[in-house]
Image: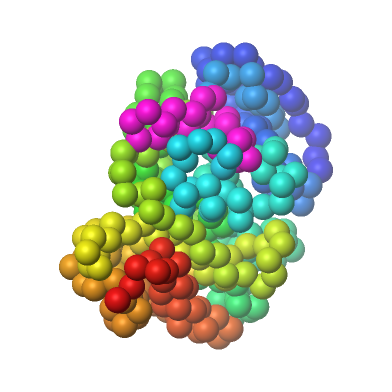
């Protein structure tokens, strides 16, 4: 780790007036600094800022500095969010990591984290080692010729499914951005990962009220049940009445360069009977546009099965 200056601003204005890397839980930033992937000259500890609070009275509002463990355990949190958080990391990390930091975490691509290897996300124009290298964990959706890394956040997948927004604060004021628009596809500029402007902070996550999201779940498939990143995950909420799907929300993770909403699957589910056959038929659309690599073609079928598994989990005992 290289030498850096550490300060701890006590107000949002002070934080925004001091350029540097923002530190909340440190579970991503500190790791990347140790690897020399990120080498900020100044680090701003923002834990004293008033960016906390959880409000479930009408939808959901979560302060960016809330800890993952506290949000997961809070009454009134939609099950899909709580389960995504509980499967995100070890208990020790969840006690440290912030909600805002989780949404902004960098990819876990091993080539990105190895400064001896070419990586367009870390060093634009150097190349993408994963395309012809070890790519079992990499994306099959939303990729480009410049980058095939997956987005690491489980929480973001659940929030994308629920049409969440992030409130951003910067020197020019406050703005609100749909989380689905916040993340950027890699295209020719994989180093630009999101819509956060220089000096801006994620202040709050806002989830619109959706009463039937109380009937939701998060299924994560991984190589081991303990702390591990997803091979594939599915965030699903279902509104089922009289044995038929009235509405649905479906998003997947571990398979795409950004948290990936499956709107075609949602459309196929609406109006269909809540049966395994209908779920399997709808899930066929999950992998539209997939571009498998040499080692990860299995993710195409795994994605479909994971979506079906999540749907079945929500309809156990109610299927015809």
Residue visible at 45% across and 37% down in the picture: 76
Span of residues in magenta: 52-71
Q: Position of residue 255 (x, y in %)?
A: 49, 69
**Colouring chosen for the image of the structure:** rainbow
Res 184 seen here: no
Q: Position of residue 211 (x, y in %)?
A: 31, 44
Nearer to me, 189 or 207: 207
Residue visible at 37% across and 39% down in the picture: 207
- The quadrant the N terminus occupies is top right
Q: Position of residue 280 (x, y in %)?
A: 34, 80
Residue visible at 69% across and 30% down in the picture: 43
Res 213 seen here: yes
Q: Say which quarter of the image contains residue 144.
A: bottom left
Let me know if residue 132 is in the magenta part.
no
Q: Identify whether 55 is placed above or below 133.
A: above
Q: Identify whether 293 is placed above or below 231.
A: below
Relative to 257, is 131 on the left or the right?
A: right
Nearer to me, 7 or 77: 77
Figure label count: 0
Q: Say which quarter of the image contains residue 247.
A: bottom left
- The quadrant the C terminus occupies is bottom left
Q: Work out which residue is located at the far left of the displayed protein and give it.
A: 271
Relative to 303, is 243 on the left or the right?
A: left
């Amino acid at each position: 780790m290289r030498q850096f200056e550490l300060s701890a601003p006590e107000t949002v204005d002070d934080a925004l007036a001091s350029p540097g890397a923002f530190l909340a839980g440190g579970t991503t930033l500190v790791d990347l600094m140790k690897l020399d992937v990120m080498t900020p000259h100044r680090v701003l500890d923002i834990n004293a800022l008033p960016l906390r609070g959880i409000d479930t009275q009408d939808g959901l509002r979560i302060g960016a500095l809330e800890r993952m463990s506290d949000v997961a355990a809070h009454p009134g949190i939609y099950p899909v969010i709580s389960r995504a958080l509980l499967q995100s990391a070890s208990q020790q990390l969840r006690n440290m990591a912030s909600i805002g930091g989780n949404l902004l975490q960098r990819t876990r691509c091993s080539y990105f984290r190895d400064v001896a290897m070419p990586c367009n996300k870390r060093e634009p124009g150097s190349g993408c080692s994963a395309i012809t290298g070890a790519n079992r964990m990499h994306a099959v959706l939303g990729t480009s010729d410049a980058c095939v890394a997956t987005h690491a956040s489980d929480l973001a997948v659940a929030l994308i499914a629920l049409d969440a927004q992030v409130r951003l604060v910067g020197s020019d004021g406050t703005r609100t951005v749909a989380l689905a628009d916040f993340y950027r596809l890699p295209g020719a500029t994989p180093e630009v990962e999101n819509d956060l402007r220089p000096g801006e902070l994620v202040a709050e996550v806002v989830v619109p009220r959706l009463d039937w999201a109380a009937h939701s779940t998060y299924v994560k498939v991984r190589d081991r049940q303990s702390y591990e990143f997803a091979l594939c995950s599915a965030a699903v909420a279902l509104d089922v009445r009289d044995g038929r799907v009235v509405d649905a929300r479906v998003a997947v993770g571990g398979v795409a360069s950004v948290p990936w909403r499956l709107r075609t699957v949602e459309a196929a589910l609406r109006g269909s009977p809540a049966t395994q056959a209908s779920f399997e038929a709808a899930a066929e659309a999950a992998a539209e546009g997939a571009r498998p690599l040499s080692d990860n073609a299995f993710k195409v079928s795994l994605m479909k099965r994971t979506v079906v598994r999540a749907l079945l989990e929500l309809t156990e005992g109610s299927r015809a």
